[in-house]
Amino acid sequence: MAVITIIGSGMMGSAMAFPARENGHEVRLVGSPLDHEIIDVCKKTNRHIKFDHDFPEGVKFYYIEDVKEAIEGADAIVCGVSSFGVDWFGENMLPIIPDDVPILSITKGLINTEDGRLITYPEYWKRFTETKKCINAVGGPCISFDLTWHDHTVVSFCGEDMEVLARLREYFSTDYYHISITKDVVGVESAVALKNGYALGVALTVGLQDRRTNGDTKMRYNCQAAVFGQALRELTKILDFQGANTLDNQVVFTGDLYVTVYGGRTRQVGILLGKGLDIDEAKAELKGVTLESLVIIERVARAVKYNAEKGILDPKDFPLLLHIYDIIIDKKPVDLPWNDFTYEG
Amino acid sequence: MAVITIIGSGMMGSAMAFPARENGHEVRLVGSPLDHEIIDVCKKTNRHIKFDHDFPEGVKFYYIEDVKEAIEGADAIVCGVSSFGVDWFGENMLPIIPDDVPILSITKGLINTEDGRLITYPEYWKRFTETKKCINAVGGPCISFDLTWHDHTVVSFCGEDMEVLARLREYFSTDYYHISITKDVVGVESAVALKNGYALGVALTVGLQDRRTNGDTKMRYNCQAAVFGQALRELTKILDFQGANTLDNQVVFTGDLYVTVYGGRTRQVGILLGKGLDIDEAKAELKGVTLESLVIIERVARAVKYNAEKGILDPKDFPLLLHIYDIIIDKKPVDLPWNDFTYEG
């Protein structure tokens, strides 16, 4: 039996408690400084506010004040913060995690550097610590809610050390949670981050359709499919740029885009923009909702623009991404460049 | 103004009348020998039985008996038969189409040869005619119903001659119908044919979920996404085998798979199989429904098996396809090999 400590009790972090605890491990779920209310309810009911059924019996819940106790003796740490908690985790958690305890991050995103690169959170976190930490990450199509429901789920654990990855896989794999392991951290993390941005692109078409028909109930798919395909095209160009253009990464992206198109928050903002709201109005409508997709679009688009100016990338390869950037940053109206999604040759 | 003759008045063939006629061309829609009733209704109402709104004004409708008149003076012929009408078209229509009139086929499928190859219909049709015909084809995500509704649609016209393709594009392209042109017939047609088989794979998971929950109304997406990603992985291996592994073809496939997962017939049979019906029971339930997906799965799986025996392909690269084959040919129960969808390295 191992000890698994999950820091951050959002939906995805909390969902990781299910396979780990069902495998018989000791699971300690620690709320972030923003999660006191969640932990209160977990302690009282053994259920997460956002889930519709209980945690497996025996999960232990901790407030952030008790995080050191929760880390004591852990065999693995899950970083369960959102991309908005990355600096907090780096500044406050990394220093108190022993170097020999592997970390598995569920945080999805990329950081753009001043020199036009897009780096992963595992790489970014190296800035916060002088000692070497073993930071791994999870990618692939996984809605937390579905995972807690034991829906079959195929994900990728990525990191620098295959032995550590195999151990992490052993902790978490169940008859419904199926885990690939790979050393291609940049590829997996790029694929996973970008799906958020492109899911917004697909959702734009749903909103456009709503606007055109005043809520015609029959869903149309040709337009969604065209954007979905274009997303794979642009993603592959980004993978090229990242030195990570592999079929495995395309597969991770495609599956992850598929679940995200139907997931909650990114879809909602895309539909509102498609309906004709500007980004401020859409944000107001979705008050308090975490919108990681907007951050990643801005970061990736800035990197593309930077490298296009240097002649390293061709902006013509990214008509969808750059149009979404124009919509959310420059408040341009939604007017998808459909003909730029065609090819010749 | 050009003259466009469409032979076969199924939904997709008939939908092609919309962009062509809206562009001001003369459009002649000819029913196949099975389409008399459709043409009867079209002549009376100017509406297709399966559509919810009228054809553009001025489309001309023909029974098959008048096909020669309909071909007279045509600038392009659309072949609108399903894959079950391929031999009929080759035997009866090709000989009466002048050699200098380009054909655009919407028929989707592949034929497997005795020596383990998978050939396209344009190639197959060469067997029916001693003279050279210019046979082009359409691929990409397009549900006919959505096209008639002017939903934005991105497709690929493929053929041997770029000038002909450019002319065909001119006939059909509108502000909602966006057309790529390419000489990669094998790639486009392989992608398009295979999406039918793999859409059935995604639908299996929907049926499995129904069975598990007795119709839980909340849709789960992790399992669908895992199969969707695996489909791209296996498709890419088939494209490799076909000598057509390009990003363009992956994009065509991915978009087309996306619309097909939500389209009608293939989804229905996959759900029924996932629920536990065997293939005969599923076919009985869907009596009279055209199931091209079953044909393509059998053909591609046979080609994979043949080439696996020769050591040319590795069956481990196709766990999803081969499992679907087992279900529909050998009536094995649905038991998706989830762990075979993971990778390592």
Image (spheres, coloured by chain):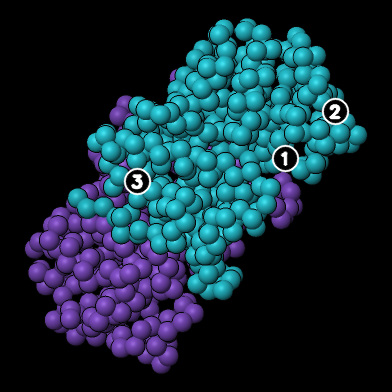
Chain colours: A purple, B cyan
Task: Please name the residue that numbered disc 1 is placed on.
Answer: B149
Chain hosting mark 3: B
How packed is label 2: few (under 14 Cα within 10 Å), some, or many (20 or more)? Answer: few
Residue drawn at 60 percent across, 41 percent down: A222
Task: Please name the residue that numbered disc 3 is placed on.
Answer: B318
Kindly indicate the quadrant of the structure image that contains residue A167.
bottom left
As rendered, which of B269 and A172 lies closer to the eye?
Answer: B269
- Distance from Cα at disc 2 to Cα at disc 1: 15 Å
Residue A283 appears at what percent x and percent y?
Answer: 54, 60
Q: Is residue A252 left or right of residue B105?
A: left
Q: Quadrant of the N terminus of chain B?
A: top right
In terms of sequence position, does the residue under pointer 2 or pointer 3 come before the other?
A: 2
Kind of residue at disc 2: Glu
Residue A142 appears at what percent x and percent y?
Answer: 39, 62
Residue A143 appears at what percent x and percent y?
Answer: 43, 64
As rendered, which of B319 and A10 lies closer to the eye?
Answer: B319
Q: Is residue A83 left or right of residue B278?
A: left
Residue A245 in sight here: no
| Figure label count | 3
Q: Is residue B175 left or right of residue A19?
A: right
Closer mark to the observer between disc 1 and disc 3: 3
In terms of sequence position, does the residue under pointer 1 or pointer 3 come before the other?
A: 1
Q: Is residue B67 above or below residue A204?
A: above
Residue drawn at 70 percent across, 37 percent down: B11
